Amino acid sequence: MIVPGSPKDLHACCKILENSELGRIYFFDKDPGRMLSKALNNEEIYVVLDDQNNCIGFILFELKGTFGKYPYLHMIVVEREFRGKGIGRELIYYFENVIAAEYDKVFLLVGDFNKRAKELYRQLGYEEIGILSDFYRKGVNEYLMGKYKK
C-alpha cells in the first residue's frame, strides 16, 4: 500500500536510505534525517507499507523541482529484501499517475553507478536528456532523464 509519509516513518526511511547504495554514495558523510524531515513536512514523501504497516520503501519528489515548473523524482529507495519485486516500478507509476498526474512532463536524475534503475526508467519511457558530471558527488555522473506524457 502506498500512502503519504508521516513523521512516524522518518526513522524507517532514514534506515532504508542508509542501507542502500544511494545512501552509501550520497550520504556517507551526512545525516539524511534533515532532508527527509523537510520532505515529510512538505508532503513530498510517499511510503510503501507492508502487511504489518511497516515502511519498506519510499519515494521522495518535488512537484515543481525541475526548473520550478515540472515534477522531479528525487529518489526511490526500497528496503534490500524487497528489491526486485516490482515495488520501485509501482512507486514510479504512482508518482506519474497520481502525484504528478496533471503534469505533461516529469524528470529525474540517475547516477551512472545505478545501471539497473536507469534501465528501468528507460523501460518505462524515460529518455536521457543529458549528463551532469560531478553534480552531487565528485566522480559520479548523473543522467538527466525525462518522460513526456501524452
Image (spheres, rainbow, N blue to C red):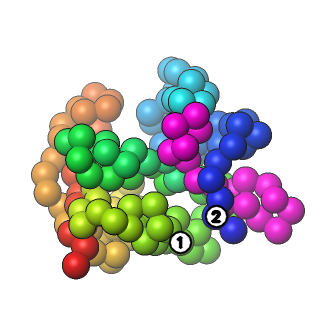
Q: Secondary structure at mark 1?
A: helix
Identify the amino acid type marked 1.
Answer: Glu
Callout 1 touching callout 2 (CB < 8 Å): yes
* Mark 2 Cα-neighbour bin, 10 Å: few <14, some 14–19, many ≥20: some
The quarter of the displayed image where residue 65 is located? top left
What x and y, as percent, mark residue 134? 23, 32
Which quadrant, please, contains the C terminus?
Answer: bottom left
Q: Which residue is mark 1?
A: 90
Q: Which residue is mark 2?
A: 2
Residue at the extreme top: 29
Gap between marks 1 and 2, in whole Å? 9 Å
**Residue situated in front as seen by the camera: 125 or 24:** 125
Q: Is residue 36 above or below residue 129?
A: above
52 is within the stretch colored magenta: yes
What x and y, as percent, mark residue 44? 50, 45
Q: Is residue 12 left or right of residue 100?
A: right
Bounds of the magenta span? 39-56
